[in-house]
Image (tube, rainbow, N blue to C red):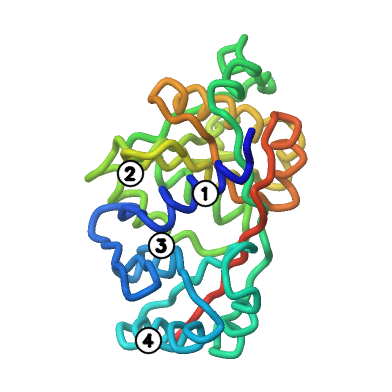
């Protein structure tokens, strides 16, 4: 893999030329910044910027004022290779609060799918009594949101509303799955399939504490990789936390750098 070339394609396709990630939202170019804007339940924030030491402070202040005027919480998604090099410090000074850094990891979907082929769950063996349930309706979204809340310890209300709208209005751009242990949801994840790009995004992989370490996350990667390859997406991309990085590395994912969420709350 030519990591520099893949990173450049990632920046161009998913950041600079990003499409709205669901119904009811829009992507705007504001000078040297690309942002997404929607309602309170949508993801709002800055996807890409091309700033210098001379232009950064003004651009950061303008974006903070823009989202504050609309009463929207916003995320400036800062990548380690973004410029200027001290953009994180400037965001912090303007009232943006950084969250934990994540590693941007990619792999070829066909390679991952092929390496994990051979079972009904795509090459990963699930424990007895456990199955993968595709999410296709509001009831499935509720199961996924319940897992998210239990796995990550946060409120899944915004996620629930966003996924319900996405499934109802743009179902071809989303794949979601819940792992069921009998009648209990114990793990879940989703995959974003933006049209016209090479990258399928792996998001939200979470397992409730008592079910971790049993191969559920790996099984969901296999499931999503198979679908991404079949639909013509060359690359799988994930923003990986410490818990998922080892699994992804073993499956052939490599790092393109890190990304840090800088949150602004009006």
Residue topped by disc 2: 138
The quarter in which the N terminus is drawn is: top right
Side of 226 where 248 appears, left or right: right
Residue topped by disc 4: 68
Mark count: 4
10 Å neighbourhood of mark 4: few (<14), some, or many (≥20)? some
Image point 71% across, 39% down: which residue? 211
Task: Name the one closer to the observer, 184 or 227.
Answer: 227
Going from the N terminus, do you reach mark 1 or mark 2 first?
Answer: 1
Asked which secondary structure carries label 4, the reply is helix
Residue topped by disc 3: 158
Going from the N terminus, do you reach mark 1 or mark 4 first?
Answer: 1
Residue topped by disc 1: 8
Nearest-to-viewer mark from 1 and 4: 1
Going from the N terminus, do you reach mark 2 or mark 3 first?
Answer: 2
Marks 1,4: beta carbons within 8 A: no
Vertical order, 31 against 115 (above or below): below
Horizontal and vertical percent position of residue 218: 66, 30
Q: From mark 4 to mark 3, how far is it between C-alphas?
A: 19 Å
């Amino acid at each position: 893999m030519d990591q520099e070339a893949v990173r450049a394609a990632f920046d161009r396709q998913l950041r600079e030329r990003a499409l709205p990630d669901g119904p009811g939202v829009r992507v705007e170019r504001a000078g040297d910044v690309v942002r997404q804007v929607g309602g309170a339940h949508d993801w709002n924030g800055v996807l890409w910027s091309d700033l210098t030491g001379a232009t950064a402070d003004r651009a950061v202040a303008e974006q903070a004022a823009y989202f504050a005027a609309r009463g929207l919480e916003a995320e400036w998604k800062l990548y380690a290779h973004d410029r200027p090099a001290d953009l994180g410090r400037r965001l912090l000074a303007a009232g943006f609060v950084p969250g934990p850094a994540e590693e941007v990891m990619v792999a070829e979907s066909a390679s991952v799918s092929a390496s994990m082929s051979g079972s009904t769950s795509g090459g990963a063996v699930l424990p007895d009594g456990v199955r993968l349930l595709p999410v296709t309706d509001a009831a499935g979204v509720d199961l996924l949101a319940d897992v998210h809340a239990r796995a990550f310890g946060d409120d899944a209300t915004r996620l629930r509303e966003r996924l319900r709208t996405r499934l109802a209005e743009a179902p071809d751009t989303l794949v979601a799955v819940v792992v069921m242990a009998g009648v209990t949801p114990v793990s879940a994840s989703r995959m974003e399939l933006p049209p016209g790009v090479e990258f399928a995004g792996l998001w939200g992989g979470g397992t409730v504490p008592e079910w971790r370490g049993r191969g559920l996350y790996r099984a969901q990667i296999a499931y999503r990789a198979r679908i991404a390859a079949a639909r013509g997406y060359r690359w799988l991309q994930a923003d990986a936390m410490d818990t998922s990085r080892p699994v992804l590395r073993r499956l052939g994912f490599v790092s393109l750098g890190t990304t840090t969420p800088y949150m602004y709350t009006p």
